[in-house]
Amino acid sequence: MSDVIIIGNGPAGISASLYTKRAGLTTTVIGKDYGALQKTDQIDNYYGFSETITGTELLENGLQQAKRLGVELVSAEVLGLDYDTQFTVKTSQGDFSAAGLVLATGAQRTAPRIPGLAEYEGKGVSYCAVCDSYFYRGKDVAVLGCCDYALHEAMELLPLVNSVTIVTNGETPGVAIPSDIQVITTPIQEFVGEDTINRVLFQDGSQISVAGIFIAVGVAGSSDLARKIGAQTQGNKIMVDDTMATNIPGFYAAGDCTGGMLQIAKAVYEGAQAGTQLVKYLRKQKKA
């Protein structure tokens, strides 16, 4: 168990780790890839570089700096998040626990553009199995996705619902699916229903009846993870105060996931703020 877990290995997450580690806290950073910044070929508006630098170079410099200071770097996909006096981060490489958490995973990915998806949000379309599985106990549900995150959400639902079907929308499943979960790879035409969603129509003319559908495309986004433990969100933005603290004690967020200006300078500042404020919080907790 670490003192601090930071989800996200970009500018905000690494910036936070520099402050928590230098304050003497054991710090683990969990990230799977470099995100959108990796695709940036030229950066000219970030302080301290006399020549243009690429996003990948900047990210690798940050990782090497954190590694030099002794930050533990874990390459894994984050699948879920629990909170019960301490934080447990569920990943493709196992579970990690800590007393404090910083979420710095960047901006939310957009949902797939399938007719009916937006119309039924909150009316049978959900983005959080842990949050909403209780409402579908004994019913038939579907999970939209094809990889680790989709399987994780399906497994969260399985003990409560009547049946779970993973619909991949034409994608080939990237993980082995247990036999008690049906898989349909046919492309989706639309989601339909009346007051709430009740069917998934496929492009080959087939359909299935469902009481709800859970969206788990790609990897878990920042607001998906935040909502799993009751943190306040507004759309795809995690709500924080001036210290980058959420409404959950010991849980801070930084970078693009908090909204506003999507710039490296903002991410680095918010990471530094989250890291220093989390240090203060944990020190108070130890004295109490």
Image (cartoon, rainbow, N blue to C red):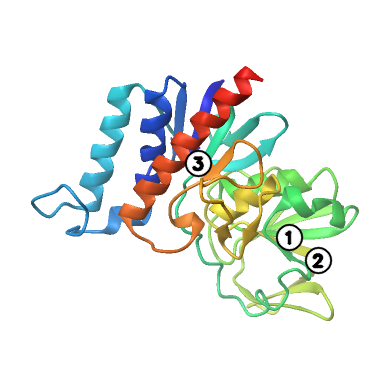
- Residue occupying the far right of the picture: 138
SS for callout 2: loop
Left or right: 222 in relation to 160: left
Alpha-carbon span between mark 3 and mark 1? 22 Å
Alpha-carbon span between mark 3 and mark 2? 28 Å
Q: Which mark is residue 69?
A: none
Alpha-carbon span between mark 2 and mark 1? 7 Å
Which corner quadrant of the image does residue 16 belong to?
top left
Q: Are dots 2 and 1 in contact, CB under 8 Å?
A: yes
Q: Which mark is residue 210?
A: 2
Q: Residues within 10 Å of mark 2 (few under 14, many from 20)?
A: many
- Quarter of the figure that contains the C terminus: top right
Residue type highlighted by circle 3: Glu
Rendered position, 56 above or below 118: above
Residue at 82 percent of width and 74 percent of height: 196
Rendered position, 7 above or below 98: below
Rendered position, 8 above or below 75: below
Residue at 68 percent of width and 37 percent of height: 82
Residue type highlighted by circle 1: Ala
Which residue position is annotated with label 1? 142
Percent of width and height locating residue 46: 22, 54
Residue 34 shows up from this direction: no
Q: Nearer the viewer, mark 3 or mark 2?
A: 3
Rendered position, 288 above or below 107: above
User: Could you tell which of marks 3 and 1 lies nearer the N-terminus?
Assistant: 3
Percent of width and height locating residue 115: 63, 80
Q: Nearer the viewer, mark 3 or mark 1?
A: 3
SS for callout 3: loop
Left or right: 60 in relation to 161: left
Q: Residues within 10 Å of mark 1 (few under 14, many from 20)?
A: many
Which residue position is annotated with label 3? 77
